[in-house]
Image (cartoon, rainbow, N blue to C red):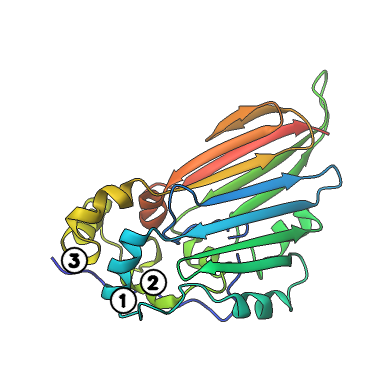
């Protein structure tokens, strides 16, 4: 079985996941190691600080460079393009970006108003991010809800949130989530094992996750899709699930205003 190579190329507007918020970043179509992380601090004024680290493990970096014909000394991330792209954005700002080595990138982002960012369809595709005020009702206090939903319907648009990534890396992985006529998750795993990554590298691939941590202004009183404790909500998403999106990735949390 041969791998498919019809994944659409990113649009010129590429910025951080889900790296920003995937949304935050929904990182999400980036091959990251278990140390890859997105940390989101939401403040009382509905602003948010987002710290992102994206990393391609060495064992996988070598393979995808070979498969994608990427030079061994070429970085997989381009900090200059990230700075350029964020220079024209209004609802999310770049505070800092660095490429510590050829296989990783770190960045710090600032969202002045989560509601404005969620409503900015030039950046956040429909349904990807929701930030809602829920009025008080009876004994229940007024709440804030932050919701993320990544599906095959918004995956291509969500990818455009990520600047600075070598397009050949994504094309070499041929993720079904970005295909118009995607193969099944089972078929994709066979492609990964036999063509793209190789059977020996699959354990390293299966260990890859995007780990996201959200800190709310107050204690989280309801949530789904992750683990909440006090003001902290954590979710770990396997990279395989993000690349295939056979099932949507969705999580949310609520806290009192």
| Other-residue count near label 3 (Cα within 10 Å), few / some / many at <14 / 14–19 / ≥20 | some
Please name the residue that numbered disc 1 is placed on.
Answer: 68
Q: Earlier in the sequence, mark 3 or mark 2?
A: 2
Q: Say what secondary structure mark 1 lies in.
A: helix
| Residue 11, position as x, y percentages in the image | 53, 78
Can you name the residue that lies furthest to the right here? 45
Secondary element type, mark 2: helix
The quarter of the image holding the N terminus is bottom left
Residue at the image position 54 percent from the left and 34 percent from the top: 226
Instruction: Identify the mark nearer the N-term, 2 or 1.
Output: 1
> Which residue is pictured at 55% across the width and 74% down the height?
164
Would you name the residue on which mark 2 appears?
169
Q: Up-down: is 129 above or below 222?
A: below
- Which quarter of the image is occupied by the C terminus? top right
Looking at the picture, how far across and down is residue 83, in whole percent? Answer: 67, 76
Question: Marks 3 and 2, how far apart in space?
Answer: 15 Å
What residue appears at the point 30 percent right and 63 percent down from the top-left corner? 182
């Amino acid at each position: 079985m041969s791998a498919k190579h019809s994944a659409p190329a990113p649009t010129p507007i590429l910025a951080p996941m889900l790296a920003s918020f995937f949304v935050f970043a929904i990182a999400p179509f980036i091959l990251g190691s278990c140390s890859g992380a997105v940390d989101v601090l939401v403040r009382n004024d509905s602003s948010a600080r987002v710290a992102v680290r994206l990393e391609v493990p060495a064992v996988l970096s070598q393979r995808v460079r070979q498969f994608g014909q990427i030079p061994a000394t070429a970085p997989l991330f381009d900090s200059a393009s990230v700075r350029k792209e964020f220079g024209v954005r209004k609802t999310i700002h770049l505070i800092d970006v660095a490429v510590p080595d050829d296989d990783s990138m770190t960045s710090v982002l600032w969202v002045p108003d989560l509601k404005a960012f969620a409503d900015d369809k030039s950046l956040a595709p429909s349904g990807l991010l929701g930030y809602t005020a829920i009025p008080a009702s009876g004994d229940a206090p007024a709440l804030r809800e932050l919701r993320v939903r990544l599906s095959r319907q918004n995956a291509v648009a969500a990818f455009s949130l990520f600047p600075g990534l070598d397009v050949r890396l994504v094309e070499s992985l041929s993720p079904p989530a970005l295909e118009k006529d995607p193969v099944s998750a089972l078929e994709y795993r066979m492609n990964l094992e036999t063509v793209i990554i190789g059977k020996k590298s699959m354990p390293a691939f299966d260990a890859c996750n995007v780990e996201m941590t959200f800190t709310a202004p107050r204690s989280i009183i309801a949530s789904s899709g992750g683990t909440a404790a006090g003001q902290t909500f954590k979710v770990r998403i396997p990279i395989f699930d993000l690349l295939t999106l056979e099932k949507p990735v969705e999580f949310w949390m609520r806290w009192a205003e």
